[in-house]
Amino acid sequence: MKLLSDALVSNDDFFVEQIQLTAIVFDNTDDVTVWATTFRDDDDHFFHLGLPFQALDTLLRVAGDRAETLAEEVADALATTEQWPCLLEYTSEESPPVALPGVALKLAVTFPADADEADDPQPHNIFYLEGIYARLAP
């Protein structure tokens, strides 16, 4: 599996579709990181996605028939976790990756904080969520 950052042509915001969530990482702040894959340029690509907790709630609602179960898992983890960060993985046969059917995500590219602007830094494989869009069937 390739890194999504290696497939970028420019540093402009862009859209991804055919998304599958493989993990959710959160702590006791408003920030969440999602590990995900997307199919792009005839290959699977892995990426990290930073987003506010409220946007995670929206993503979970569009997870098809798993939406309710995922929301309960996150709520249970929030209520019972004693050590932060909390990691919920979806990479096994019992808990497979979570497909987001009919969804496109607009992502913003991020760069290392210590990068010198003159060095033309490589983007991180960590993106920030700019928006969640529903694909309308023709």
Image: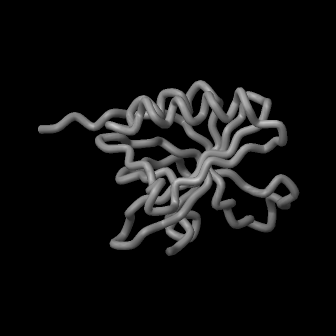
How many marks overall? 0
Q: Quadrant of the C terminus?
A: top left
Residue 93: name its quadrant. bottom left
| Placement of 90 over or under 70, stated as above or below | below
Q: In this image, 25 relative to 84: left or right? A: left
Q: Residue at x 61, y 54 (%)?
A: 48
Relative image position of residue 135 (x, y in whole percent)? 28, 37
Front one among 75 and 117: 75
Looking at the picture, the colour scheme in use is one colour
Q: Is 117 left, or right, of 133 in this rendering?
A: right
- Can you give x and y, in whole percent of width and height, for residue 58 in the image? 48, 28
Image: 19 above or below 102: below
Identify the residue shown where x is 52% and y is 46%: 13
Question: 100 above or below 77?
Answer: below
Q: Residue furthest left?
A: 138
Q: Is residue 93 left or right of residue 84?
A: left
Q: Is residue 116 left or right of residue 42?
A: right
Residue in the picture at 58% in, 51% down: 23
Seen at 35% across and 53% down, the residue is 18
- The percent position of residue 62, horizontal first and vertical second, equals 38, 33
